[in-house]
Amino acid sequence: MDIRAQVSMVFHLDKCIGCHTCSVACKNIWTDRKGTEYMWWNNVETKPGTGYPTLWQDQDKYKGGWEKKEDKLSLKLQGRIGALANIFFNPSLPTIDDYYEPWTYRYEELFNAPPGDDQPTARPVSLITSRPIDIEAGPNWDDDLGGSQLYAKNDPVLKNSTEEERHLLNEVERNVFFYLPRICNHCLNPGCVAACPAGAVNPGAMYKRGEDGIVLISPEKCRAWRMCVSGCPYKKVYYNWATGKSEKCILCYPRLESGHAPACFHVCVGRVRFLGILLYDADRIQETASVNDTDLVEAQRAIIQDPFDFQVIAAAKANGISDAMIDSAQKSPVYKFVKQWKIALPLSPQFRTLPMLFYVPPLLPVLATMKNGHYEVAGAGEKGMIPLLTSLEQARIPLSYMAGLFAAGNKKIVEEVYRKLIAVRIYMRAKSVMDIPASEVQQALVSGGTTEEEALAIFQLTSRSTFEEHFVIPPLAREMNIETTVDPDTHKQDAGFGFRKIIKRRG
């Protein structure tokens, strides 16, 4: 048992309002330099949709992640021989058109234009070539109702949907959608790290920190082969055309090391984001990533270890994991959502990278209608709220789509999550509005596989939690190493978990 600690995240999609505050905060801090104009380490997509970069989920096109061949895992991109053959030309690399060509405007033309009969305009020019361009796409080109007939129906996840389900989405056009915020998943089995050719001769060009699992790139060692861009199935590694180096989300580790939440987490308007520590068994990574598609979610849950188990605690301490880190794992909201309550799911687990960013699916698949001028949930009214539990197959966005997005096609897993979420909604409505009989509440809880205590705990963490409950950040190992120094006033070694003693001198 090789117990390690991983900084992990949960995004609650029922709470995301698509305001892009997270994207702008990240952009202002990390990607406002030359060569990073097209980079969005944090972006928010409208789903169903093709996403950013376009069709990033289509691994027949981009060859990202891992695939299972004869019970063995191999990179979908290429093997060692393929890496040597394609080292100077990567046919699976996204082009700038798959993202968008960043632009600005010639504002001086507005001020310096000579007098004339026509209104002067500021022409768009490329930030890469400085030449005039016609704007054809942007980072959120298909937001909300934009391009409904084009983007929604071309979503790669819909490939496995039936003709009837695809027709339903086209009929409602984009009146039914939800937002999907995305950052680097800091996976347990990252394809980007494995695909890096520089790692074979120059270890550390791309690496996963042992103390907290954050995946980083060393700009000094990066040789710009860009295989990491293709190897990441989520397309969260970018190439800086100005510096000739790859870049990616660093989970704001300087903020984490000082006890602060990452910028996109901190500014989130809807309080969508949760952050905490998970303990996992590194010896089981290959085994977990090698199971069949339908078993991937359960296998990923199983690799996450119980932070209260004495054997797990002993193994963690043997690996140098501090008591503060273990205490944080015991308080982690991510552990509750993913392992304890089982309502948060990984994005596209079929890529087999074991992502450490999980999503609570949105409740929008529940149908709603107008009756006598009043907005009602399908099945509610005279018959109560229980028909909600049987209306999932009539969802406006099919369960098969959600299963393709969050469970590698396993509809049963997604249905279990939705039944529990609906049970929580029914239970809390009964407590606040008091219009549902106790018998129906109990029936909903049984159907959702939950209890009153668990339903209340889910509601409290989702809607009533404090800032400290949202983000359980321990003193990380690097900060502890910095802070645990010799105090110049006492000439003694500091004790504790990285917190220096403050010694007040008497005058």
Image (cartoon, rainbow, N blue to C red):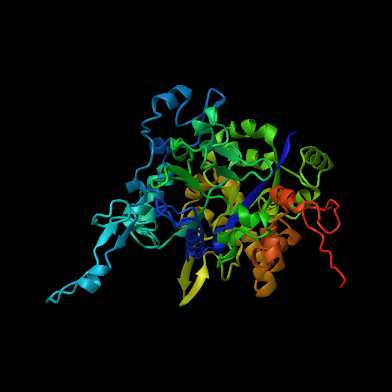
Say left or right for 194 vs 146: right
Residue at horizontal 77%, vertical 48%?
A: 326
Is any part of residue 328 visible from this angle? yes
The image quarter in which residue 466 lies: bottom right
The image shows residue 72, relative to residue 47, as above or below, that is: above
Q: Position of residue 350 (x, y in %)?
A: 52, 38
**Residue shown at 62% from the left, 54% from the top:** 254
The one nearer the camera, 105 or 291, is 105
Image x and y of residue 334, in percent: 67, 53
Quadrant including the N terminus: top right
Q: Farthest front residue?
A: 507
Q: Nearer the viewer, residue 274 or 393?
A: 274
Q: Quadrant of the C terminus?
A: bottom right
Name of the residue lying farthest toward the left:
117
Residue at point 40%, 48% (across, down): 53
Q: Quadrant of residue 303?
A: top right
Q: Position of residue 224 (x, y in %)?
A: 44, 38
Where 146 sits versus 250, above or below? Answer: below
Q: Position of residue 294 (x, y in %)?
A: 56, 37
Most foreground residue, 425 or 491: 491
